[in-house]
Image: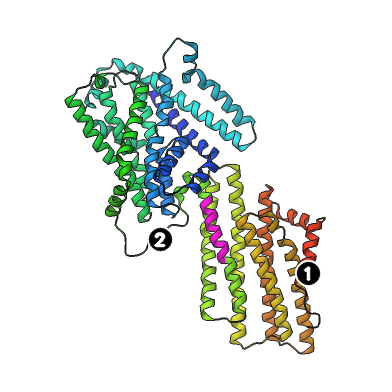
Amino acid sequence: MDIFDMLTLIGGLSLFLFGLSLMGQALERRAGGQLRSLLEKLTSGKLVGLLTGLGVTAVIQSSSVTTVMVVGFVNSGLMTLKQAINIIMGANIGTTVTAWILSLSGIESENLFVRLLKPSSFTPVLGLIGIIFYMFCKGTKKKDTGMILLGFATMMFGMETMSGAVAGLREVPAFQQMFVMFKNPVLGVLAGAALTAVIQSSSASVGILQALAVTGQVSYGAAIPIIMGQNIGTCVTAMLSSVGANRNAKRAALVHLSFNVIGTAVWLTAFCLLRTMLRPPLLDEPASLLGVAVAHSVFNVLCTLLMFPLSGFLERLVKLLVPDARQPEVFEELDERLFATPSIALERCHAVTVDMAEAAVSSLKDALASLGDASPTLAASIREKEDKTDHYEDILGTYLVNLSARQISAADNREAAKLLKLISDFERIADHAVNVLESAEELREKEIRFTEAATGELEVLSRAVGDILDLSLASYLQNDLSVAAKVEPLEQVIDQLKEQLRTRHILRLQKGDCTIDAGFTWLDLLTNLERTADHCSNIAGCVIDAAHDTMNLHQSLREARNGSEVFQEQYREYRRKYTLDLNG
């Protein structure tokens, strides 16, 4: 093997790792919705969790990514430790799919149909289809499909290149001696663990082992301990991802490590006993690509069969290793570990936005109540909710921008843009709640009293604002266009109410029925309540825009106001419902 073969090997390895990563990312984007559904349907059932982990890992082609994702779920409170254990076990089986795909390279036959199964026969066709989809199709899903095919073709081409580059090693004595050394099971385990820890992918390290098996110098006796070690090395990614996470997330990463270390220790002991006592001839035979895939699958299935009934023991073990703190566990609201699965990261953003929306609406309703009784307890609650919405706007805005900068599907990108618009309106509603509270406190501190007519008018406006808050919140929570359509007519009525109340205030001032101080507070209240209605209109308009795949809010509102009989009917109904007493 000369320097040129070494360069070819490096190039083949680079293409193999790049293709594997490219295919996994595109598969995740293409299956993002299904992954989200899997999470929603997840229960505490052990078998369901096992199958979920298996399925997700088979799709995204990486147990490391699945485990990092699970650590993020546990850290965010989306998943319990018990659920995480079962999913991690399933991930270890799901990761064997890649080795089976790569084993197709080892097919040897003169039969036409069998030869068509070789990647070298169908990979160019897949690559051609992939580049056509990627370059000439406009739909995001079609582009992702093309990226999957291109990633697969690149991965298989890299595998073929690596195999060709190392083929000459079969005649190199030093190479033969190296794998004779790896027949020592402990050295084999350490070598497999080290390689996988460096490249952080057991699928990739198994692929490299399969490429080396082409030389015929890798016996089953050397390959099996290396495969065992690869399962330990793949834990590095999850362990690194748990740094800075809460205790349960650290436990989830430790479950992954414990599962693989215990499984490797047990089956390595059994392997050594079998080799010593029975000396099966198979262990001295050269490993094939298919043989490595079979050994990889059998070992992971055996580990799962061993540890599946002991999931309760694993849970107790990691809790012993990472004991509870005196303070209650705090879950991280938004975890960047979820960036590995953008669709689920977006689902977490939605959940946090729901919490933010409910806090904002509740704060404004409490502020309206404070006009009758601005108690210190109620005031503290309103300000606490406003602080909460400020915090949520900061973390959601940063998180969504960083998420959007990644390669995500068009649907996820639209949802991220929708949330970015919504959080601003929810935060402003909470700001107006504090403004209303300050007006209520000013009324109490200065002992200002509104006239009886003004109090009645304010009650009408407050009822209208309370209703529009409920409608806008429901339209977002339920993603209900019929509810969203009711918001804009009510917002128009609230605008008119504000103008009527300003006019009546001026008339009372001219008659001497109202003081200047009361007038300033009155106008502040009208402004804050009217602007609250504006933000409610923005929220409902955003829901409608997102459903119609457009973010042109002003155009949507113009269309709603003009030429819609339904809009006019609802507008007239709200006018009747919130009519002011003309004698006031």
Q: Is residue 409 above or below residue 443?
A: above
- Residue occupying the point 35% across, 26% down: 294
Q: Is residue 248 left or right of residue 132?
A: left
Please say whether residue 407 is visible from this viewpoint: no
Q: Is residue 383 left or right of residue 480?
A: left
Majority SS type along the magenta span: helix
The amino acid type found where label 2 is placed reads Val
Please say whether residue 550 is visible from this viewpoint: yes
The disc placed on residue 330 is 2
Membership of 167 in magenta stretch: no
Quarter of the image for the N terminus: give it. top left
What element does badge 1 sit on?
helix
- Residue occupying the point 42% across, 44% down: 49
| Mark closer to the chain start, 1 or 2 | 2
The disc placed on residue 575 is 1
Q: Position of residue 555 (x, y in %)?
A: 75, 53
Q: Depth check: give the residue in front, 214 or 306.
A: 306
Membership of 356 in magenta stretch: yes
Q: Is residue 191 above or below residue 81?
A: above
Q: Position of residue 338 (x, y in %)?
A: 47, 48
Q: Are marks 1 and 2 in contact (CB under 8 Å)?
A: no
